[in-house]
Image: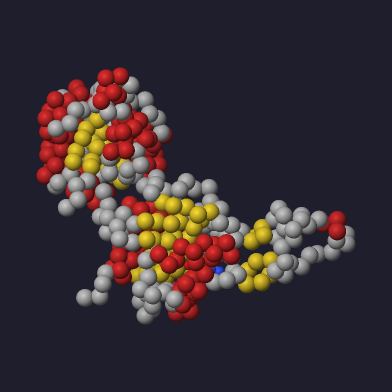
Amino acid sequence: MEQRRILIGVTGGIAAYKVPELVRDLSRAGHAVRCVATPEAVSFVTPLVLQTLTGEPVRTALLDPAEEGAIDHIALADWADLYLVAPATANTLAKLAHGLADDLVSAVALATRAPLLVAPAMNVNMWRHPATQQNAERLRERGVRFVGPDAGELACGWEGEGRMAEPEVIAATAGLALGSRTLAADVVLVTAGGTRERVDAVRFLGNRSSGKMGFAVASEAARRGAAVVLVAAPSALATPPGVRRIDVESAEEMREAVLRELPVSTVVVMTAAVADFRPAAPAERKLKKEDLAESAGMMLELERTPDILAEICKEKADRVVVGFAAESHDLVAAARRKIARKGCDLLVANDISASGSGFDSDENAVHFVWPAGEVEELPSLPKSEVAAQLLDRVEKLREPAA
Ligand code: C5P
């Protein structure tokens, strides 16, 4: 098994006394483990214990010259394949949610490109406080994983939610969060966002796609070890770590980029909302209303854009191709017709009329529609989870037939 590197950020809660057990569980699972700690954490667990178990010095200060000289905090952040903050106090969750970096544990969280897993531990009232809940929600939306907290007897004397999850459960979750590298042999091409079709020098025809679904697929594919190319129509989203991004504007530019990247791709996921029509004769200069009669309307002649998905399905070879369909009514029937027409391996249909789903939402309620017409209906899930479910299906399709 390939050895993976887990950096544990220990913060100042009583549950820190369980971190030595966590280190042992992770080491037994074959991982390389290092620890960083806040100054408060070392009141609950000594650096010497952690150093003895990990075989590595434990840094506790952000700007200590001697510690920075041995291994600076950026090098530590780069070293990690997974950053696990355990226990995560309410204070640390707040810092992570807002991007503060005034101690080593939170600074590493900002600097690392590794996935983040947190194991909260605190008094039940602190956990239930709306401020903490909002911070947790914010982190989840950003793709941060949580393990626990569990309910039960708390060290502070209260009963309720707030206990750190058991070390063996945290260790198992860390294994999952590390990613399976199940797509390490694949090149995944993803399209995302809404295309813009030029009307004149300043105007375009566009649509409401935010690109979030495609960016989530690209991010998850990279986490699973794939080489990922993201062909992105204009989007304000940041490029996910480990992803090569190609920016395009129109359907035609998207088509050219996709066709260029296609020969080496083994998986194609087309989430982009591609315009179906574009102005037939876009104007070089800005169209002016003064050029028209006072009360005249204006006709804009539209022509069809190329259907990129249908085109690449014609020469699919053994590539897996997934299409998306945004429908406002008659979802499943339309999706069945669409998969038959386009010829892809899987169609992901979402109902854009439902609230909390589709355009610009962080969640999506989708149906997976298969070529023979079977349908899997998923509940509303964060787009990162929809991406994970989708890539689980893609991996099955990539498995050589037995
Ligand atoms: O035909 P419709 O736009 O509903 O199909 C949606 C699916 O087809 C999406 O996967 C989208 O990315 C793709 N598509 C395309 N080229 C077009 C229109 C849609 O690749 N011109």
Residue in front for this viewpoint, 257 or 117 = 257
Q: Position of residue 45 (x, y in %)?
A: 16, 27
Is 121 rendered above or below residue 268? Answer: above
Residue extending furthest toward the top: 65
Q: Residue at x 24, y 30 (%)?
A: 36
Q: Residue at x 72, y 54 (%)?
A: 201
Q: In the rendered image, which quarter is residue 344 located in?
A: bottom left
Residue in front for this viewpoint, 216 or 306 = 306
Q: In the rendered image, which quarter is residue 366 located in?
A: bottom left
Q: Is residue 207 left or right of residue 45?
A: right
Q: Is residue 94 left or right of residue 51?
A: right
Q: Residue at x 40, y 64 (%)?
A: 264
Is 309 rendered above or below residue 71? Answer: below
Q: Position of residue 108 (x, y in %)?
A: 33, 33
Question: Visible in this render: residue 92?
Answer: no
Number of labelled discs?
0
| Rendered image coloring scheme | secondary structure
Q: Quadrant of the C terminus?
A: bottom left
Q: Residue at x 20, y 24 (%)?
A: 42
Question: Visible in this render: residue 276?
Answer: yes
Q: Position of residue 112 (x, y in %)?
A: 34, 38
Q: Is residue 389 left or right of residue 160?
A: right
Q: Position of residue 220 (x, y in %)?
A: 36, 54
